[in-house]
Image: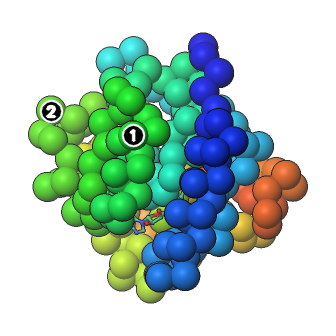
Amino acid sequence: MSDITFSKPAETANSALFFRRWLRNPLQMGSIIPSSPALCRRIAAAVQRGPEEHVLELGAGTGVVSAALLASGVPAHKLTVVEIVPEMADFLREALPGVNVICGDAFDLKNALPEHLHGRIGTAICGIPLVLLPLERQRAFVEAVESVAPGKGFLLYTYCITSPLPYGKLGLAAKRLAWTPLNFPPASVWRYTPRPAR
Ligand SMILES: C[S@@+](CC[C@H](N)C(=O)[O-])C[C@H]1O[C@@H](n2cnc3c(N)ncnc32)[C@H](O)[C@@H]1O
């Protein structure tokens, strides 16, 4: 396990980039500041991964969750992050050497993710503000994850008090794994998994 944290100047650059992107597209960002270290640690603690499996982070922003995953022991070469904003993907490549950074759309994982990773994902983590999207888009996201990580579902962090997704309508089972007041606003980590068809 290593202690991977951003230096003060990197942290400032990180927050400034995040805020700039929020001004440009608040719905795409979903938050004005990056997730707190307390939330990132809780997300990392919920990750399950076999020795050969990869962790897939969707909507990596400026990489605070990614850094917590590395610090928790996920090897850089087993971490793939997908970020739709090219400027943020460039930032991630610089900040996270050895991590596979893909500038792409998490709703198109089948094409965005190299084939050798299909079916080899231990945990997918969603940082995209799904709660703001209509049901059809949420369904498209669930299907995108299922296309590359069948049966695995995903972790989702949220500021909502109750489930941010109508999981029954999406054919998912849901479990709240963690909550922290040490985030602005306080946040929870949920695990969603596909419900077997009856
Ligand atoms: C709430 S921020 C989370 C950033 C970071 N993971 C954190 O916790 O601080 C959401 C991120 O998802 C990215 N995003 C939004 N839609 C996306 C999509 N369709 N595919 C990939 N990334 C997306 C945004 O650009 C933004 O960086």
> Which numbered circle lies on residue 116?
2
Q: Where is residue 130 in the image (x, y as percent from the top left)?
A: 50, 71
Q: Could you tell me which residue is drawn at 32 percent across and 18 percent down?
A: 52
Q: How many marks?
A: 2
In which quadrant is the C terminus drawn? bottom left
In what element is the residue under mark 1?
Answer: helix
Label 2 packing within 10 angstroms: few (<14), some (14-19), many (20+): few
Between residue 20 and residue 180, name the one nearer to us. Answer: 20
**Residue type pointed to by label 2:** His
Q: Could you tell me which residue is drawn at 15 percent across and 41 percent down?
A: 114
State whether residue 131 is above or below residue 114.
Answer: below
State whether residue 100 is above or below residue 181.
Answer: above
Q: Where is residue 56 in the image (x, y as percent from the top left)?
A: 39, 42
Q: Which residue lies furthest to the right in this view?
A: 181
Between residue 8 and residue 65, name the one nearer to us. Answer: 8
Tag 1 near tag 2, CB within 8 Å: no
Q: Where is residue 15 in the image (x, y as percent from the top left)?
A: 62, 59
Between residue 104 and residue 152, name the one nearer to us. Answer: 104
Q: Could you tell me which residue is drawn at 31 percent across and 61 percent down?
A: 86
Q: Could you tell me which residue is drawn at 35 percent across and 53 percent down?
A: 89
State whether residue 58 is above or below residue 2.
Answer: below
Q: Distance between the residues labelled 1 and 2?
A: 24 Å
Image quadrant where residue 150 sits: top left
**Residue type pointed to by label 1:** Glu
Q: Is residue 120 left or right of residue 66?
A: left
Image quadrant where residue 163 sits: bottom right
- First along the sequence among labels 1 and 2: 1
In which quadrant is the N terminus drawn? top right
In what element is the residue under mark 2?
Answer: helix
Between residue 100 and residue 86, name the one nearer to us. Answer: 86
- Residue identifier under label 1: 94
